[in-house]
């Protein structure tokens, strides 16, 4: 009798555990597209972000030319990592502009601050942010740039809502994402995004996809502007 009771308690506990883990697993997919959300790249990936071959593989300067950055632009580099793009952005916007460099990993921000100081750039403000909040000032940003980042957001919907609040009404939200449509791009599947996945997910949070540039070797440039929120 005691054994039977013990077994039935074990079964309910196992069922509860299975349910909890399946709920957890379901949180790791985007509800609008069923896209699996990628793990966050840890600080161990820092050397990869700064690899010299990146110039050739991703053409970062060409990417920034295509996006178009005027001196004096207020920029948020969200998921800035070690500052590979932050430094290039800071030079382009110049002393009349500003770059907020945002990342959830304190070690990335530490490395970013050092790399920015080495190049004597004084127009960068580094922010250790939260998984669901970029901690940016409201209504101040002209351009939000996320390079190989959006697919890692654990809370993409909450992040996009906060990012929309941070943008000026005429501001732009720009994603660079590895092309999922191209199997020759040598990046893990869950670290790539298709144009359609990005459009569906980002437009659902009050943006409009206004331009797609696919001329970079590995990434799409996806330019969004604040627009009407879709009613489901
Ligand atoms: C693949 S790295 C890209 C870094 C940088 N954008 C670059 O291209 O060199 C992705 C970065 O996004 C950051 N990240 C992930 N989720 C984030 C979130 N919710 N808010 C801010 N940063 C985030 C990670 O900590 C990591 O540093």
Image: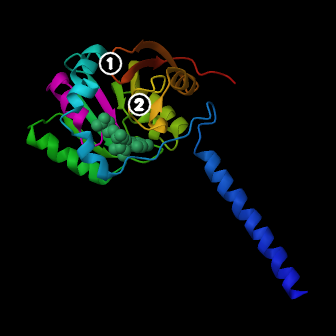
* Label drawn at residue 205: none
Mark 1 and mark 2 lie on one chain; the one further toward the N terminus is 2
Q: Which residues are magenta?
A: 75-97
Residue occupied by mark 1:
216
Most extreme residue toward the right is 1
**For the residue labelled by badge 2, is the local secondary structure a helix, a strand or a loop?**
helix
Residue at the spot 62% in from the left edge and 35% down from the top edge = 34
Q: Is residue 31 left or right of residue 149?
A: right
* For residue 20, above or below residue 3: above
> Marks 1 and 2, how far apart in space?
28 Å
> Left or right: 138 with respect to 94?
right
Q: Position of residue 11 (x, y in %)?
A: 80, 70
The residue closer to the viewer here, 39 or 72, is 39
Residue 103 in view, yes or no: no
84 is higher (above) or lower (below) than 139:
below
Ligand 1 resides in the quarter of the picture at top left
Q: Nearer the viewer, residue 187 or 168?
A: 187
What residue appears at the point 31 percent right and 16 percent down from the top-left corner?
Answer: 67
Q: Secondary structure at mark 1?
A: loop
Percent of width and height locating residue 224 = 45, 19
The foreground one among 61 and 137 is 61
The residue at 48%/44% (across/down) is: 132
Say if the magenta span includes residue 88: yes
Work out whether 60 lies above or below 122: above
**Residue 180 shows in the view:** yes
Identify the colour scheme used: rainbow
Is label 1 or label 2 in front?
1
User: Disc 1 vs disc 2: Cβ atoms closer than 8 Å?
Assistant: no
Q: Position of residue 89 (x, y in %)?
A: 22, 27
- Residue under numbered circle 2: 166
């Amino acid at each position: 009798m005691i054994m039977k009771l013990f077994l039935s308690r074990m079964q309910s506990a196992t069922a509860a555990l299975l349910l909890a883990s399946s709920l957890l697993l379901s949180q790791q997919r985007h509800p609008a597209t069923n896209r699996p959300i990628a793990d966050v790249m840890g600080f161990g990936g820092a050397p990869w972000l700064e690899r010299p071959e990146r110039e050739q593989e991703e053409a970062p300067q060409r990417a920034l030319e295509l996006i178009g950055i005027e001196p004096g632009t207020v920029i948020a580099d969200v998921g800035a990592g070690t500052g590979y793009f932050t430094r290039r952005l800071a030079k382009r916007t110049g002393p009349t502009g500003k770059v907020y460099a945002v990342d959830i990993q304190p070690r990335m921000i530490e490395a970013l601050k050092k790399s920015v100081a080495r190049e004597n750039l004084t127009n960068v403000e580094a922010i250790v942010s939260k998984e669901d909040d970029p901690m940016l000032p409201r209504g101040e940003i002209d351009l939000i740039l996320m390079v190989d980042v959006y697919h890692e957001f654990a809370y993409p919907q909450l992040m996009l809502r906060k990012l929309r609040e941070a943008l000026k009404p005429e501001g732009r939200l720009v994603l660079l994402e590895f092309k999922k449509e191209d199997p020759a791009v040598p990046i893990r599947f869950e670290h790539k995004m298709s144009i359609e996945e990005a459009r569906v997910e980002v437009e659902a949070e009050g943006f409009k996809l206004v331009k797609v540039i696919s001329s970079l070797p590995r990434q799409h440039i996806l330019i969004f502007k604040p627009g009407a929120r879709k009613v489901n």
